[in-house]
Image (cartoon, rainbow, N blue to C red):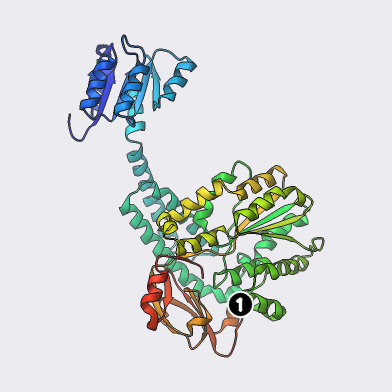
Amino acid sequence: MTGGKKQILWVDDEIEFLRAHIMFLEEHNYDVTKATNGDDAIELIKENHFDLIFLDEQMPGKDGLTTLEELKVFEPNIPVVMVTKSEEEQLMEEAFGHNINSYLTKPVNPSQILSVCKRILHVNTIKKTVITSSYVTEYAEYKAKFMTRQSIPDWHDRYQVLCKWDINLQTLKDQGLLETHNNHKAEASHKFIKYIEENYISWHSGREPNNFLITQSLSNHLFPLLQENKKTCLVVMTGLRMDQWLTMKPALEPFFNLVEKNACALLPTNRLYCRSALLAGETALRISQDHPQLWEHMNKGEDPEVYEQELLKLNLFKHGIRDIDNPVIKYIRAKSDSDRFLSDIETYDDEKLVVLVVDFPEMLMRLREESTLIMEMAPDEQGLREITKIWFKSSNLLKILQRFALADRSVVFTSDHGSVLVKRPVEVFCQEEKTPNPRVKIGQDISCDERHVFFIESPAIFGLPSTGQGVGYAIAKEDFYFTYPNKYQYFGTRFKGQMVNG
């Protein structure tokens, strides 16, 4: 047998009548070995490698199904196409029960045969060629488009496309293409950070529209539903990334008419600043000014149940929604929490608004840091997506959402902030005990390399509260994280490769 060609075994007691078909395959660069009965076919399989078998169902002696059963003992994974004169449903079910890959009904023509060979033997190569071509074309279009001034919707669109390619390219296992894609993402990240540096202050000053910020999310998407008297559920997935959402989305499509909108989290992108902004519809600065005692509780790291319901009540009242005195907020932190909610779900039927805060994404990041097993299962973003997909498909959360869909309850599904896989350490000089987050440092006299750090000297103009004279914020850019000069090795090793918010 010749080295580069795909090897086909064709088993048929009337093989001589198939000479034209065999010649046609050989002209298309296949090597075809012929057998006229099941016994010869099994002997050939024992001694040779084949990529595909065409197997006649009706043969004297061993028929096709018997031959199929025996050959699978020696080559359980070899693709088999059953060729039959019969279209009986029972026969087809029995054949598929023996793990055939396809079947053809006689008389067959050469184009059918070639089509089956292409589909079974070359699908990955064809798919790779099509995807690669599509990727190159799309990247060139975006490259040209991003030569002009961009808006937030443009960046939202670009990010979603990059996340979709994250998922599409992982099936190809083409290291070169993945490396190219990662370079494209790094380039986009670098440009987006420059865009944020140039525009962030104007969004908070009111000089430019800012209805895409997370502070406007509930007024844009949740409150209109409540004002129309629609029963609604707000699901807040703590730390959920766009690429994780895209792996969860197919499980929801049969139950909901999905409409996707994007919003920008605030700086720094962690729970304290972003979830409070989401629920309150205000920046941390405004919350600290208007509700200083509430902000004090929040800043101490107390359980969010203490203050998040109050933040949401204030936002509802501000928007004229005054028939929800005590919005129901349930926190899903463990399976027992979701078990309890699912068993009691009917007790919430009369509630106009139900809020679920689901900590799974953030818990997964913590487990990944603490467990070598989870780290091995999810060493990168792809692994994180796979675990998220597996969890969601079997989760109580999906069952809860399905029940809401059946009850005609609208669902607003969102994240409060994302996370970054950090890879590169950058030194920072400050008091480490005040801000343990490896992506965010808050304090006096912070010193760091501003090429890799977004440094905020005047917090108020960024919508951030100040905790004292001369207090600034340092936020790591791209995939950087902070380490201290006197503990460089400790922090460098501890956080490298972790998923971190901020």
Q: Can you name the residue that lies furthest to the top here?
A: 60
Of residues 401 and 367, the one nearer the viewer is: 367
The structure residue drawn at horizontal position 82% and vertical position 60%, both measured from the top left corner, is 323
Horizontal side of 156 relative to 313 (left or right) equals left
The quadrant of the rendering that contains the N terminus is: top left
- Residue 206 appears in the figure: no
Label 1 residue SS: loop
Amino acid carrying mark 1 in the image: Gly
- Residue 357 appears in the figure: yes
Horizontal side of 257 relative to 370 (left or right) equals right
Q: Which residue is mark 1?
A: 463
Using the rendered view, name the quadrant where residue 38 is placed: top left
The structure residue drawn at horizontal position 46% and vertical position 51%, both measured from the top left corner, is 386
Of residues 313 and 177, the one nearer the viewer is: 313
Identify whether 355 is placed above or below 472: above
User: In x, y percent, where is residue 312?
Assistant: 71, 66
User: In x, y percent, where is residue 285?
Assistant: 64, 78
Using the rendered view, name the quadrant where residue 200 is placed: bottom right
